[in-house]
Image (cartoon, coloured by chain):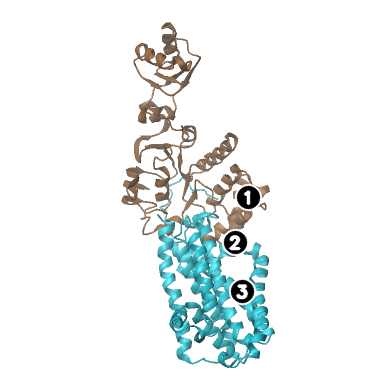
Amino acid sequence: MRARGLTKRFGSFTAVDGIDFDLFRGEAFGFLGPNGAGKSSTMRMIGCVSPPTHGELTILGADPVRDGAAIRAKLGVVPQEDTLDAELTVRENLLVYGRYFGLPRAVIRERTAQLLDFVQLAERADSMVEPLSGGMKRRLTIARSLINDPEILILDEPTTGLDPQARHVVWDRLFRLKQRGVTLILTTHYMDEAEQLCDRLVVMDHARIVAEGTPRELIDRYSTPEVLELRFDPSLHDQAAEKINDIFPERTEVTADRILLYAADGEEALARVQRAGLEPLTQLVRRSTLEDVFLHLTGRRLVD
Amino acid sequence: MAVTTEVAAPEVTLGPVPGWWRMSVRGFRCWLTTYRRLWRASVYSSVLGPVFYLAAMGYGLGSLVDKHGTASLGGVPYVEFVAPAILAFQAMNTGMSNAAFPVYSAVHWARIYIAARATGLRAGDIFRGHLMFITMRVAMNSACFVVVMAAFGTIRSAWAALLLPAAALTGLAFAAVVAAWAVTLKNVNPMNYAFRFGAVPMMLFSGTFFPVTRLPGWLQPVAYATPLWHGVALCRALSLGTGLDPASVAMHVGYLAAMTGIALWAGSATYRRRLYV
């Protein structure tokens, strides 16, 4: 898959502003960015349900506008909001979807059994969709997206709105798919999701791509190995921030409730803070994450 | 199961897209799967309604009408005059009501179209697949009513064998227009107006319960221009075996077929604009 100058406008609003990326077979590729960055619009163009306004997009060697239907037949899509048929059972949802792709009943039956096993819903095969939990519905959507044995699986915010436990189950299943060599494209505004699942990712902000690389490369390039997080009494927050700027000139970020010190050695930075007589309420030395990369690139946090 | 081989994976080749009929049938089957769960309830409501009309209008009101002579109805008892018209407007109603809110819901509430658009189907396939299902529903209801008409002895001609396709065409013409339009809507109010100010007056004044010639002179051309009048006139001619000259049959069928054709063409565009933005 290849995009050059890919642009999507809705009237005067530019949702995606001339982005370039290349994507290879068997790769897990992520679009990381806050809400409204243009991730979902990009995914809809990749899913061939939204024609680009400008630019070049090639998917599986074909043009999504001219060959949209043929490309879609080779894609699996997990949309941000579930589009399951609540009036049908779990099994019937897979049946209907498989029929859209023109699969014979016998093939659908066989794949349904395998897929429901895979997403751990086998014992719910004949229950209606409506009473299923959010995590179960998402897993069913993933099973449904695999019914046509797709070349590429597209996931738009696959764990948004799920509780932590359900998220881990979904991650585990997606990780297994990745191990099997399925090409994954996903959007997320969770940095831990991107770190766990993506071989390579782009960071999007304000309709543009602001950085690209593996999670490791991005952290090496845009952050320091360690981060010291300090939290002060709110009344002392601003004062402390000023002082820290003096004693730790390398790089700091001040957020609403915390002060982050980007250091090669977090303990050493903490020692400097303590020598200066500052007394934080809490202190934490941790490794850098993609959240720090995003903060550095945009001056804002991913999830507000 | 989704497994790609890592060893020098061959180039992906996109398969050919099957023809529009096969693709539309794929869309149709989705509706059929859902309907298998609901058909009993729907049959009661959609068959009993027209039967009530037949009893109340045909026999209740008809007993009064027949006392005053039915020369202006072509000399047939009122029930025989009104039964094919009830068939035609129930076909219209079934077509319209299965197209209006269900199409809106498939975009906004149940989101069946939103799920379907991500597959190999195209906008036109989704549209035609849904119309196939609606036409099937029209045909089912109409078949039930034709049986009732026959059982009550209101049919006079062997041409009545063609009542079913005539009613199905009437229902399809309305369904195609309404679906092509409903998919563009952003709220439900216009659909309520379409029923109140479109379907209801048509049902009352399109030569259904009384001949169009009884309307004020200036209103008659309006009645003759409505699609329902063509459906009613066609069904009545087939049921009574009168007025079956090739020219007027061709006009009625041609009108309804043209309406369907234009709506099929327009709907492919409105569906594409709504679903692939």
B15, above or below A36, in the image: below
Dot 1 and dot 2 within a common chain: yes
Which of discs 1 and 2 lies nearer the camera? The answer is 1
Colour of chain B in the rendered structure image:
cyan
Disc 2 residue type? Arg
Colour of chain A in the rendered structure image:
brown
Q: How crowded is mark 1: few (under 14 residues within 10 Å), some or many (20 or more)?
A: some
Q: Which mark is residue A130?
A: 1
Residue B83 point in image, percent of width and height: 61, 82
Disc 2 vs disc 3: Cβ atoms closer than 8 Å?
no
Disc 3 vs disc 1: Cβ atoms closer than 8 Å?
no
A153 and B258: which is toward the camera: B258
Residue B196 in view of the camera: yes
Residue A75 point in image, percent of width and height: 46, 52
Dot 3 and dot 1 within a common chain: no
Rendered residue at 51%/75% (across/down): B202
B142, above or below A201, in the image: below
Disc 3 residue type? Met
B212 and B276: which is toward the camera: B212
Left or right: residue B225 versus residue B99 is: left
Which structural element holds mark 2? Answer: helix
Which structural element holds mark 3? Answer: helix
A50 and B21: which is toward the camera: A50
Residue position marked by numbered label 3 in the rendering: B140
Residue position marked by numbered label 2 in the rendering: A105
Q: Quadrant of residue B62?
A: bottom right
Separation of marks 3 and 1 at Cα, in angstroms:
29 Å
